[in-house]
């Protein structure tokens, strides 16, 4: 949620998906009309949104569906967004919602996950799938695992 200097809550929209996992949105003050543009990841936007908002791309995908299917998809995606605490619905998150949050894994990544110590496997799985959705990746891959592992390993090393 963004507050205008005048004290009014600014309204977000539209939101566009940029290359990679970046979004671009414009906040407008309904009272004085001040407009602020901002770029960030879906997670950044989640923190600044009160009501769920669909990106232009996600909206376009829903609008292309047969009219009878649209309310069902909107409801399904909305429920998934609330459950995941998503503020913004991207095309990738919409697909994830329709898959009931199930993210595909490459066979190599799946084999590697089996080798992750049981104590952290469930957490690693959730974090990897969440990151894949946020980045619009079609599946969890070994390079993604390597990248997140480096990040967590870096954090752990920093505590010593
Ligand atoms: Zn204002």
Image (cartoon, rainbow, N blue to C red):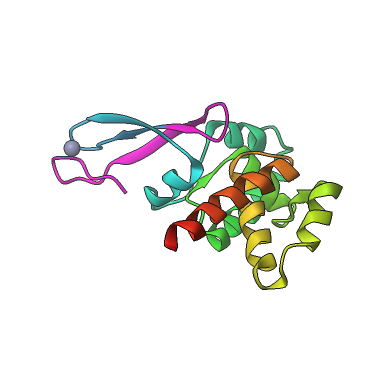
Is 44 included in the stretch rendered in magenta?
Answer: no
Q: Is residue 137 visible?
A: yes
Residue visible at 67% across and 44% down in the picture: 144
Residue visible at 74% across and 51% down in the picture: 103
As drawn, 153 above or below 25: below
Image quarter for ligand 1 equals top left
Q: Position of residue 107 (x, y in %)?
A: 86, 49
Q: Position of residue 153 (x, y in %)?
A: 56, 55
Residue 70 shown left or right of residue 59 in the figure: right
Magenta region: which residues? Answer: 1-24
Q: Quadrant of residue 24?
A: top left
User: Camera-side residue: 88 or 113?
Assistant: 113
Q: Residue furthest left?
A: 6
User: Camera-side residue: 132 or 160?
Assistant: 160
Residue visible at 63% across and 38% down in the picture: 91
Q: Residue furthest top?
A: 19
User: Camera-side residue: 9 or 101?
Assistant: 101
Q: Residue furthest bottom?
A: 119
Q: Quadrant of the C terminus?
A: bottom left
Q: Quadrant of residue 80?
A: bottom right
Q: Position of residue 124 (x, y in %)?
A: 65, 60
């Amino acid at each position: 949620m963004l507050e205008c200097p005048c004290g009014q809550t600014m309204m977000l929209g539209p939101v566009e998906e940029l290359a990679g996992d970046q979004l671009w949105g414009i906040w407008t003050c309904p009272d004085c009309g001040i407009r602020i543009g901002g770029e960030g990841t879906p997670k950044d936007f989640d923190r600044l949104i009160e009501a769920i908002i669909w990106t232009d791309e996600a909206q376009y995908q829903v609008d292309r569906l047969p009219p009878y299917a649209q309310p069902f998809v909107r409801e399904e995606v909305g429920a998934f967004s609330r459950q995941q605490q998503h503020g913004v619905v991207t095309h990738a998150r919409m697909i994830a919602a329709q898959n009931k949050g199930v993210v595909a894994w490459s066979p190599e990544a799946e084999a590697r996950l089996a080798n992750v110590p049981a104590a952290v496997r469930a957490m690693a799985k959730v974090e990897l799938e969440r990151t894949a959705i946020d980045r619009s990746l079609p599946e969890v891959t070994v390079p993604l695992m390597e990248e997140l592992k480096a990040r967590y390993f870096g954090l752990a090393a920093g505590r010593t």
